Image (spheres, grey):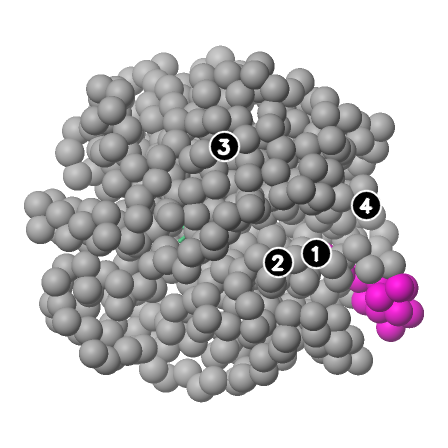
Amino acid sequence: MKYFSTRDTDIRVSAANAIAKGLSADGGLYVPEVLPTLPDGALKNLCGMSYMQRAVYVMSMFLDDFTTSELTNYTNRAYSTVGFDTPDIAPVYSIDDTTHFLELWHGPTCAFKDMALQMLPYLLTSSLKKIGEDKDVCILVATSGDTGKAALEGFADVEGTKILVFYPQDGVSDIQKLQMTSQSGSNVGVCAVKGNFDDAQTGVKTIFSDELLRNELAKRGWMLSSANSINWGRLLPQIVYYISAYCDLVNSNNISIGDKINFCVPTGNFGDILAGYYAMKMGLPVNKLICASNMNDVLTDFIDTGTYDRNREFFTTISPSMDILVSSNLERLLFDISGYDDVLIREYMLKLSNEGRYTVSDDIKDAIKSVFAAGYCDDDETKNVINRTFSEKNYLIDTHTAVAYGVLEKYRNSTGDNTISVVVSTASPYKFCDSVLSAIGEHVDEHGLALIDLLEHRTGVPAPMPLKNLNKKVVRFTDSVERNQLTEKVLDFLK
Ligand SMILES: *Cc1c(COP(=O)(O)O)cnc(C)c1O
């Protein structure tokens, strides 16, 4: 199966090429030329499989230049109990008959980014071999908090790679910052950017489009690649857990095969929910995909009105991994919904970069609305949801998951749709202790790691080991740069 660029369908590359390159040279994102569909009986078979087997099954439908034994090898290493604290890998937790939480934070960094970034290093390094690339690869990451750590953990000490992570200086939690700045490994670098996530992301995108820099790095034996969710190798592993959650609900007798369910997804760059859309297009029975935002509600407005407008105030919220105004992966949805109209996508994306806004046609708007619903929660509502969920259901959720659950409740109230719903739970509450503690009514005057003990003591919910063990780590990286100095940092890192 070939992959083409959302901005030029004449560009056709192999899966290995798409994963190795990350982003197409025309600025477009790689998408599969045809979405494979689950054959009759596949869901039933998948129900009888482990998470690892489900991952092999689903990924091999998209990666015909990888053998089943290669994929089995990668999956066994990526999704094992070495890195994950449960053999279920992505368990579903039910708070009542119609509300289920897909817990994607049982991996080494306690956020859902692990689901893809434990897998990506295998896919990427073998893709490079398959295309005959002899340069080493440097992964550049702009992170709103969780990607950075998950990418560092995935690529640490992977042969033939280096990884450099940029994070917004004041845009991540204490725990997130410490997780990154204490990362071990001889091939890793971490640097703060004086700005917000969009500044960091724009800086990294500029580097990728800098021909002179690329040539200079090539002379030094390096090529650049990305671990952001624009890379197909990041998105693909995420399709698996939607299908896996469905199977788990079948196995627990909450649904029967064929029943449609909703997924409500806390959304930033639109990668996670897009994977749900692809799962649906493959034949997973889905009623609605509900796109949940925090105060940075650019996607809520877009889905409601058809106008995407990033010209608005940027808010720093208690769900920082969703503090994003330009959701890169939306381009892939538009490409699919428009019937692969690359000319139209180029037009929208040009408008986005020139004017910061574009309006889709009514057809596209209606097609999006037939699948997606959207809503947002502000910080007070989010805390309220955490509080209620803990006091009424004895279930502790993080700020991002709470945004999604809050949006699901609003959606249910306004539509009366009581379809069985899965809230995609994207982080351990222990990654955002200060906000979670204050949500459950605790006065917080300490900060950093002390809060982990406090939250544990207050709730009786055990903290994940990787976070508990942070107090044994030392900070290795303290650099920060201005937002226009990322290039110098890269040159220095690869000297
Ligand atoms: C990255 C992240 C999100 C947003 O996911 P996208 O794929 O960017 O939409 C939500 N919650 C958490 C905890 C995250 O780390």
CA gap between label 4 and label 3 equals 27 Å
x then y, percent, for residue 438: 19, 64
CA gap between label 4 and label 1 equals 12 Å
Label placed on residue 205: 1
Circles 1 and 2: CB distance less than 8 Å? yes
Q: Residues within 10 Å of mark 4 (few under 14, many from 20)?
A: few
Tell me the kind of residue under disc 2.
Gln
**Disc 3 marks which residue?**
302
Tell me the kind of residue under disc 4.
Ala
Tell me the kind of residue under disc 3.
Phe
Circles 1 and 3: CB distance less than 8 Å? no
Q: Quadrant of the N terminus?
A: top right
Q: Which label sits in the foreground, 4 or 1?
A: 1
Does label 3 point to a residue whose CB lies under 8 Å from ligand 1?
Answer: no
Pick whichever of labels 2 and 4 is earlier in the sequence. 4
Q: Residues within 10 Å of mark 2 (few under 14, many from 20)?
A: many
Q: Which region shows up in magenta? A: 212-225
Q: Quadrant of the C terminus?
A: bottom right
Given residues 53 and 189, the one toward you in this image is: 189
**Disc 4 marks which residue?**
25
Helix, strand or loop at disc 3?
Answer: helix
x then y, percent, for residue 56: 54, 38
x then y, percent, for residue 227: 62, 55
Circles 2 and 4: CB distance less than 8 Å? no
Residue 65 forms part of the magenta stretch: no
Pick whichever of labels 4 and 1 is earlier in the sequence. 4
CA gap between label 1 and label 2 equals 6 Å
Q: Which label sits in the foreground, 2 or 4?
A: 2
**Can the viewer see residue 100 in this picture?**
yes
